[in-house]
Amino acid sequence: MSELADRLKEEVNTLRRLRDELRVKLALGQAEIRDRWELTEKRWYELEGRMKELREASRAEAKEIGAAARLLVDEIKEGYEHLRKQM
């Protein structure tokens, strides 16, 4: 894997741990938090698809897919951090 893919993989693993933690807390959470969770979950599944594409892509495609994945990682991280602060 390229350096970009390795960094993204590491960040995705960090997000996965945070996601698991939040999922447990969400069971006790409020309605507005659930709405934010559902929105962020949609982005999570999109990110998982991008990571799969990245693993299967050529170098030229990987740059483009990696950039899109990078934006998703940032957006998901922001969503999870917001949720964490609300709990």
Image (cartoon, rainbow, N blue to C red):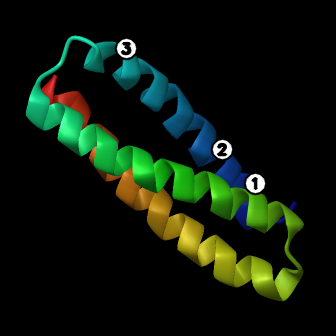
- Looking at this view, name the residue that lies furthest to the bottom: 60
Q: How far apart are marks 2 and 1 (CA)?
A: 6 Å
Q: Position of residue 59 (x, y in %)?
A: 86, 81
Q: Mark 3 points at which residue?
A: 24
Residue 33 higher or lower than 68, as above or below:
above
What residue is rendered at 31% in x and 42% in y?
38
When the figure is inspected, residue 72 is found, relative to residue 19, above or below; the finding is below
Residue in view at x 78 percent, y 84 percent: 61
Residue at position x 70%, y 58% in the image: 51
In this view, 60 is above or below 10: below
Q: How crowded is mark 2: few (under 14 residues within 10 Å), some or many (20 or more)?
A: few
Q: Residues within 10 Å of mark 3 (few under 14, many from 20)?
A: few
Q: Which quadrant would the N terminus be assigned to in this image?
A: bottom right
Residue 55 in which image quadrant: bottom right
Circles 2 and 1 in contact, beta carbons < 8 Å:
yes
Q: Which of marks 3 and 1 is nearer the N terminus?
A: 1
Amino acid type of the residue tagged 2 in the rendering: Glu
User: Position of 34 compared to 17: left or right?
Assistant: left
Q: Which mark is residue 6?
A: 1
Residue 3 visible somewhere in the drawing: no
Q: Are marks 3 and 2 in contact (CB under 8 Å)?
A: no
Circle nearer the viewer, 3 or 2: 3
Q: How far, Cα to Cα, is label 3 from label 1?
A: 28 Å
Please tell me whether mark 1 sits on a helix, a strand or a loop. Answer: helix
Looking at the image, tell me whether mark 3 or mark 2 is earlier in sequence order: 2
Q: What residue type is labelled 3?
A: Val
Q: Distance between the residues labelled 3 and 2?
A: 22 Å
Please rate how many residues cluster around mark 1, counting C-alpha atoms within 10 Å: few if below 14, some from 14 to 19, many from 20. few
Give me the disc on residue 10: 2
Number of callouts: 3
